[in-house]
Image: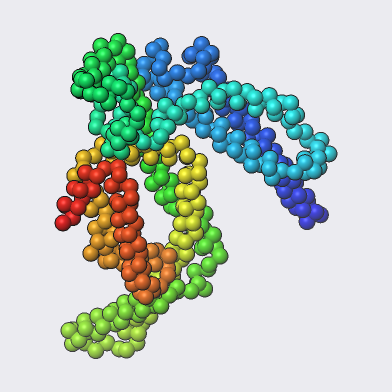
Amino acid sequence: MNNSGLGQKIYSFLWAAYEQYLRTPERSLNKAYDAALKIQKIENEHFNGNKIDSNSTTYSSSIINYFESDLKKELKIIRMRLTEFRASRYFLSEPNQKAIRKRGIEFLEPSIILDKLRFIDEIIAKYNSFDAEIIPQDHVAKPIDVPAKSIVVQPRQPDILRKKVDNEPRGKTDTTGVLPRSIFNTINRLQAELDPQAEQNVVQSFRTAQKRTIISVRFILLLIIVPILTHQLSKAFLVGPIIDHVREPEQAVVFLNEEMEEKALLELQRFEEKIKFENLLGNVSPPIENIETQLREKAEEIAGEFRQESANAIKNVFADILSVIAFVFLLLMSKREIAVLKSFFDNIVYGLSDSAKAFIIILFTDIFVGFHSPHGWEVILDGISRHWGLPANHDFIFLFIATFPVILDTIFKYWIFRYLNRISPSAVATYRNMNE
């Protein structure tokens, strides 16, 4: 009777889990629909039914940033849930749903699903240009995207952009040279300074640059924090308890490799020599049994330490795998943030002087492929081996040091010759002079 009741409970639990799996498309669609309703609620309550506009003069910049933060969060939920909706529908079969319907459980009607999808599309269609306000279309960032009509003088653009402008077809005024082009540039600058919309354009450009910086810094912190938190939490609450349960401490292998065993024997040998040395200094000849007892206690202590170290190395392997999965998932779900981050780094790089660019290039090349880099690579590889409990294969380490920095050096030189020489020839010239 007890076995029958337990089997019925297990069957009910498995059936409920299976039903939840079949309802994944419906659940994902409802969450995306709720997020779209929240966006519509903000529009109706604060923007008279219109889209959330960052250029609105009704609210201050802090309130606009608050609304845009909620908008970005809800749009991200919609994208994630719609992706989950499409993927789950791909793996879901109609016969499975029919089997569920026979038990009196109904799913959403197709007409309701279409209405919800239509409503979601109407909401997100208003904000197709929301990312374009922050991400440049060509992904080539200028220091600040100030419009032509602005009271701020444009910063120096990269050499490749100047070449592109010089190669474009010119009018008769530019080609004939009746008047110097600087006169026309001065006239255009005066027109920009006298434009009544200049201040508004500058404020809007500053807000765009500010959003880009906030998104980039936050995304960089997420890329650092998420893998570390995943590693620590999974190791403490998921991987650790499983490994400790499967791998019994009393019967577990003490050493994962020969290096651990050699290290333990060396530590025990030093302890034995220390005891004998102290006894000789005291001019006392203790019984052999006392020395053996102390050695046995020390050996058990060392074995416990290395058994714990071996278990910790095994936990690190699985925790690192989960960290990599979390990192890759974050990258796959953050395509917009990646584009903004690329624009942010381009903005920083193009804003540096030629000397600063050359300094950074020399710094990175000397660290990773320079004369002293083999020692750093050896320390890194030894640390990784200890982290995973693997024996340090010195032949592999020497082979890696003999090949990988050479490959990196070739890539650096090809990048400098192929791309940097076209983007900033003056930075390449400065790099060569500093390198000499």
Report whether residue 233 is seen.
no
The residue depicted at 26 percent of the width and 14 percent of the height is: 191
Residue 294: percent from left, percent from top: 33, 80
Instruction: Judge by depth and name the residue closer to the eye, 15 or 220.
Output: 220
Which residue occupies the foreground of this view, 141 or 174? 174
Note whether residue 325 is visible: yes
Q: Position of residue 116 (x, y in %)?
A: 66, 26
Quarter of the picture holding the N terminus: bottom right
Work out whether 403 lies above or below 134: below
Q: Is residue 373 above or below residue 218?
A: below
Quadrant of the image containing the C terminus: bottom left
State the colouring used for the structure image.
Answer: rainbow
Rendering coords of residue 15 (x, y %)? 74, 46
Query: How many numbered discs, if any?
Result: 0
Query: In this view, which residue lies farthest toward the right?
Result: 102
Residue 233 lies, with reference to residue 177, above or below; the image says below
For the point 27% across and 38% down, the residue is 159
Of 20 and 116, nearer the camera is 116
Q: What residue sits 55% from the left and 63% below the top?
A: 245
Please state if 71 lies on the left or on the right of 342 as rendered.
right
Instruction: State which quadrant residue 187 falls in.
Output: top left
Residue beneath the point at 32% across and 26% down: 170
Residue at the limit of the structure toward the front, as seen here: 176
Q: Quadrant of residue 59 in the image?
A: top left
Looking at the picture, how far across and down is residue 89, in whole percent?
Answer: 68, 40
Answer left or right for 88 relative to 390: right
**119 lies left or right of 106:** left
